[in-house]
Amino acid sequence: MAKTKSKPKKAVPKKRVELRLRVNLSRILITGILIILFLPFVISLWSLKGSDLKVETSQALADIKASKVKEVSVEDSKLVLTYNDDSVKVANKEASESFADLLEKEGIEPSSIKYTVVDLSLIKMIAEAAGIIIPILLIGAFLFYMLRAQNRAAGDIFSFGRSKAKLFAKGKQDITFADVAGVDDAKKELVEVVDFLKNPGKYRRMGARTPKGVLLFGPAGVGKTLLAKAVAGEAGVPFFSMAGSEFMEMLVGVGASRVRDLFANAKASAPSIIFIDEIDAIGRQRGRGGFVGGHDEREQTLNQILVEMDGFTPNDNVVVVAATNRGDLLDPALLRPGRFDRRVTLDMPDKEGRLAILRIHARGKRLARGINWERIADRSVGFSGADLENMLNEAAIQAARSGKDSIEMSDIEEAATKVKLGPAKRKLQSEEDKRLTAYHEAGHALVAHFMPKADPVQRISIVARGMSLGHTEISPASDRSHETKTRLIESIAVMLGGRAAENVVFKEMTAGAANDIKNATRYAKAMVVDLGMSSLGPTNFGATSETGEFGNMEWYESPSISPATQEKVDVEIKKIIDTGLTTATKVVKKNRKLLDKVVKVLMEKETIDRDEFEKIVGGKKQ
């Protein structure tokens, strides 16, 4: 027989054992109190129940004389009689009078009846002692628990000002710089910081001082916290980690106290590293962002950080690493040299970075042969490292759910679409609705294909996802940093390709183009008021961009724009939108036969990838 290995039992944490002991002690104490409180009541009930079995002493003696009783138990002033039929009755007697004397008075030979005398003197003594000792013990236990609770509450009050930083010792953090990809410049900066602390003499010989701080900022998911974990894994020095929100409490002054305690611990362990995640929670610019007066708790905490990082007290061997995705909100005093000497921007990974990230997250996953990583990297433009990790995880879940032995290319492509647009939803649609959706999506794809500067179509689907009934995935062929006027105008035409197809085929408009129109208007507005790409010239008309990233902008109109200027801006925006719709309509009319072919395949398969689409319409001309 094959031997089965038994799983080793997990060690129960010490804190959990202590908690169980406390719970058991509490239960025992509560049970004891209830027993003592209800014992007299139970005894009285038992006594009442036994009152029906009492007999007179004369009757008991008569029964003994008549040989109806086979055994008697003498308990102080009570006689417990066991009759021949095994019934039991109780009779009273004088406590000072012995049972033998009582029998002789009645003329009964003591040897004629079996009886035993029970000595209750010891039990009485124990009962009397218990009546004194148990209340004392209960009062003592009650006082003990009260004092302990008070001490614990007092300890909690005095521990408010203590730092809640987590200390990572060497060897306890298994993430290293080898597990970080796609942010090579930022990694280089932090590798250097770790080397500063490991080999300070090498830099001091050149007259260099250790950087006081490194600030990592960039969009969510690009790897700021992962980099900090890698520093904790690589550094041979103590690493203190704390979130910005953990400094804040309801009591004023607690945040500053925790900052002092954190830096005191770090200095005592120097050389060391402090990591503050989401530092914008406490480092926002003073005088704005909701501060009230000069004694705000957040402002006091920030002031203490400023002093600790570069004040009168020397702080040479403690490096502060902080992360935020809102670097624009931080106080200028925090960003000056001598505090955060280095500011490292982490961007979305480029193609090479995405390939490196995919290789890292592909470890430990069962992958089928023929996975085209280049193609996956091409279609995942704009994905952060967290998105890529989530994509491969979703692909693994999809493959497992389908009962496959390994993750296939189709699983990864479906997962990429799911991460970007959400899970597929099988809505009940009529054939007419599906046909409308198919022509709308095919219109987007066709216009994108025939626009020279537009990005290539990666996927077309009439499967509902999120709030949309279908989607056309158009991803950049390569990473780029600039957007030209021609490409933006063609992008607007692509966005309006669905509406153009509806007009040409059905002579009708649907509500499905609402989001397309919104995005097209957003692009046109950016071109006119923010980018100076209209006949009004390179002038900013008082609009400011929140992110500067196309497709994710918010504008705040300035009241200084005159009504006449605003009218001109509106005219230019409408002109760009009308040009885009006209261009899209021309493309759809010119290629109507190809549009019908694409729709026919879409109605059959519901989803078409790039290769199938280009088989129908031909290769894209660049």
Image: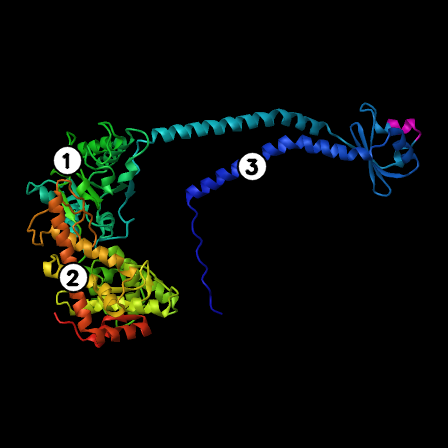
Q: Amino acid at mark 1?
A: Ala
Q: Which mark is residue 28?
A: 3
| Residue 112 in sight here | yes
Q: What is the C-alpha distance between the residues marked 3 and 1?
A: 59 Å
Question: Label 1 near label 3: C-beta < 8 Å?
Answer: no
Query: How many angstroms separate mark 2 from mark 3 (CA)?
Result: 80 Å
User: Residue at coordinates 24% horizontally, 50% vertically from top-left?
Assistant: 220
The image quadrant of residue 183 is: bottom left
Residue indicated by mark 1 = 333
Q: Quadrant of residue 50?
A: top right
Secondary structure under the numbered disc 3 in the rendered image: helix
Which residues, given as a range, are shown in magenta?
A: 101-107
Left-right relation of 550 to 608: left
Alpha-carbon neighbours of circle 1 within 10 Å: few (<14), some, or many (≥20)? some
In the current view of this chain or complex, which residue is farthest to the top? 96
Q: Which mark is residue 580?
A: 2
Residue type highlighted by circle 3 = Ile
Of the 4 image quadrants, the one containing the C terminus is: bottom left
Callout 2 amino acid:
Gly
